[in-house]
Structure formats: C-alpha cells, structure tokens
Image: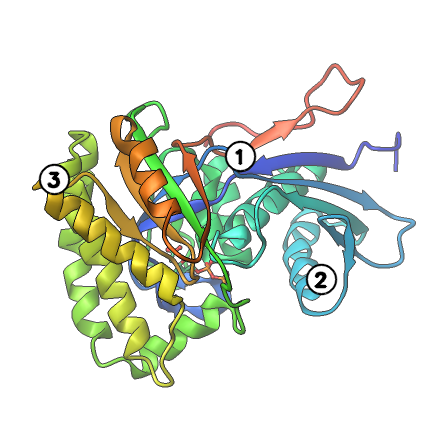
Amino acid sequence: MGAPGRYSATCVASPNIALVKYWGQRIPEYNVPYNSSLSLTLAGLSTRTRVTFDPDLPADTLELNGTAVEGGPRDDVRRFLDLFRERAGRRWSARVVSRNNFPTASGMASSASGFAALAGAAMAALRLRGGLRILSRYARRGSGSATRSIYGGFVYWRAGRHWDGDDSYAVPFRGPEHWPAFRDIACLVAGAPVKSIRSQEAMQRSVATSPVYGRRQKELRRRLRRMQAAIILRDPDRLFPVVMEECDSFREVCETTDPPLDYLTPSSRAILDEVRSINDEAGRYLAAYTHDAGAHVHVFTTAPYARSIARRLGALRGVTETRILRPGPGVRWIPRAGSEDPAVELRVG
Ligand code: DP6
C-alpha cells in the first residue's frame, strides 16, 4: 500500500443555515431536491474528519467525538464511502475519526458539515480527481444540505433537471468576504428533542401529505431571486422580511404534514416573537429569524446590533447559549504532519 498514512487525509467543514430551505426530494436515492436552495456557511463551527483507508482493516470504523459509533450512522458512513471506493477501484476499509465543536443532531446541521468533511477527506485520501463541484455532488449523496457546505459564504444549490441528478450541485453565490458585517446569532435552546427521523424521511412525508407543499414550491423561485438581489446589495431591509417569510412557509409545511412535524420548543417560539418585537420597536428590519429541522433558532442581523440583540435573546427563558457567528469558509484540508506536500490534490472546479 505504500508508506503509512499515504491513503489518509483530514478535511474540515462548517455547517450552513438555509435561507431558502431544501425540503422534498425529486430523486430520493441520490438526495436530489425538487427546489434550488440558498444558504450561509458559518464560521466558528466545524467538523474535522480524518479518513484512513487501510487494506489490513477488516471493516470500516467510525469514531465520533471520541466515541466509537456502531449501527445506523456507521452503516450510512460505510455506504457513503463505497461511492469513493467504487470510483477508485479499491476495496479497502477505512478508519474515520470525526469531531464536531458543536452539538450533534440538534438542528445545527451537523450532517451538513459531517458529510462535507467526510467527502473531502475520502476524496483526497484516495487521490480521486475532480474539483469542488464534483466534491459537492459527492457530499449530496451523504446528506442534501452537505452539498452546500463545500463552499463558504452565501451558497446556491441548483436543483438540476437531469434524470440522474448529475447537474444537482452547489455553486458559490457570494463569498464570506462579500458582507463582512453580516452576523448570525445561533440561539441554543434547552430541551431540544433529539431528531427521531432523518430530515430525508420527514421531507418526503411533507411532499406526500402537506396540502400547502405545492403552493410553497411555486413561491420559491421568486423568493430566491429577491434574496439574491438583497444579498448583492447587502440590504437587510430587503433580505430579512423574505428570510422570515420563507421560514414561516417551511414551518407551515411541517405543521401541515401528516403526522405533523413540530421541531420547535416554547423557547424557540419565544425567540421568533422577540425578533418580531425588535423589528416592530425599531420600525425597520434589524433582525430575521430562521430555523431548520430542529429547535435551535438562527437570528440574522448586522454587526452594530449583534451584541445587544444576542443579550436580549439570551435573557429569554430556556435559551441556554447565544453565539454570534460570521460568514464562514468552505471545506479546507489539513496537510499531513511532517509532510511537505499538502494532503490534497483537489482543484477548484
Ligand atoms: C430543513 O439534508 O440535512 O435543514 O440528511 O436527513 O440530515 P438529512 O437531511 P438534510 O435536510 C436539510 C433540511 C433543512 C433545510 C436545508 O438545510 O435546506
């Protein structure tokens, strides 16, 4: 197999929060969505994953935050790594060691940063050719939202039209440097239930049963365009109302799914109310709330208001932590210790 560590790579990725939500799959086996979506990759939160392919290993192993993981999540990782093994023509098992610096499976999109980092590490470890676009397509196969965590800043995931989803991948929309004053206050709430089913399954229930799903799909294109224009102009007064409209529409779909999907706790709902009050008092849009399929709420604002709004939200009952986050980078690779050559040969695609 060559020198030890030769088929090893470490990749770091950050989670993203969706401004336009991905909810519903046109091709479920490949996580190909019905609609395009838009997200912001977040700085300060990350998953760091090392993958080592080793011909002497009898089976894949997964260690997450220092604990060996068996069962479903390990099987997901094994199936995901099979994609890379097939492409490389290797049957080697892999040792995967992954660590998040934020809560796992809590609505903080750990599946996005997790599969983005795993894809980056697996692709580099096996020296597979291809750029970030190909990496984004690989990441999609692990978790839809991981498609977007490949890039930093504001990211657009085009739904694509091909029968096999080959044209469904993310592209950078505006990098993290575009809007330096943009802030996301991640509000963690107490008692956030651990997800009982993966979003992939929940969203297909919504497609099948929510009476408002079709109407939402028709509204999305216009909402996406309005958000893109507002981001280009760095204009919160244009962006924030549309962000909240989209979040409300996503929540309406969840609540009208049979059986209903209720991700929020009373504290999450109190955060939404508080943001409405902040804007009403100011007579303009200082902040916007959004949430994914989890109880934690993200509140967008700009630098001058971030601390005072975070203090106000942090004082609400059941809010355990507020973290002020900036637009963050896309995937990055950690060079091997003691090696001159970087562990990666990926080019920007
Ligand atoms: C509500 O792609 O994260 O966050 O693979 O089951 O984790 P799983 O699903 P995932 O679903 C994301 C849904 C969403 C909206 C979004 O991120 O666009």
Q: Is residue 83 visible?
A: yes
Closer-to-camera residue (235/295): 295
In primary-sequence order, the first of circles 2 and 3 is 2
Which numbered dot is residue 331? Answer: 1
- Mark 2 residue's CB less than 8 Å from ligand 1: no
Which numbered dot is residue 282? Answer: 3
In primary-sequence order, the first of circles 2 and 1 is 2
Task: Using the numbered discs, state the Cα–Cα distance from disc 2 to disc 1 in whole angstroms.
Answer: 22 Å
Q: Is residue 225 visible?
A: no
Closer-to-camera residue (91/262): 262
Q: Secondary structure at mark 2?
A: helix
In primary-sequence order, the first of circles 3 and 1 is 3
Give the residue furthest to the left: 283
Give the residue furthest to the top: 340
**Residue 346, x across and y down, in percent:** 57, 30
Q: What residue appears at the point 57 percent right and 45 percent down from the top-left corner?
A: 102
Q: Does the residue at mark 2 contact the one at mark 1 (Cβ under 8 Å)? A: no
Discs 3/1, front: 3
Task: Using the numbered discs, state the Cα–Cα distance from disc 2 to disc 3 in whole angstroms.
Answer: 49 Å
**Residue 172, x across and y down, in percent:** 35, 35
In the displayed structure image, the side of residue 29 where residue 178 appears, left or right: left
The local crowd at label 2, few if under 14, some if 14 to 19, many if 20 or more residues have their Cα within 10 Å, is: some
Discs 2/3, front: 3
Identify residue type, mark 3: Ala
Asked if 148 appears above or below 34 in the picture, the reply is: above
Circle 2 is placed at which residue position? 74
Closer-to-camera residue (73/256): 256
Identify residue type, mark 1: Val
Identify residue type, mark 2: Arg
- In which quadrant of the rendered image does the C terminus lie? top left
- Quadrant for ligand 1? bottom left
Q: Secondary structure at mark 1?
A: loop
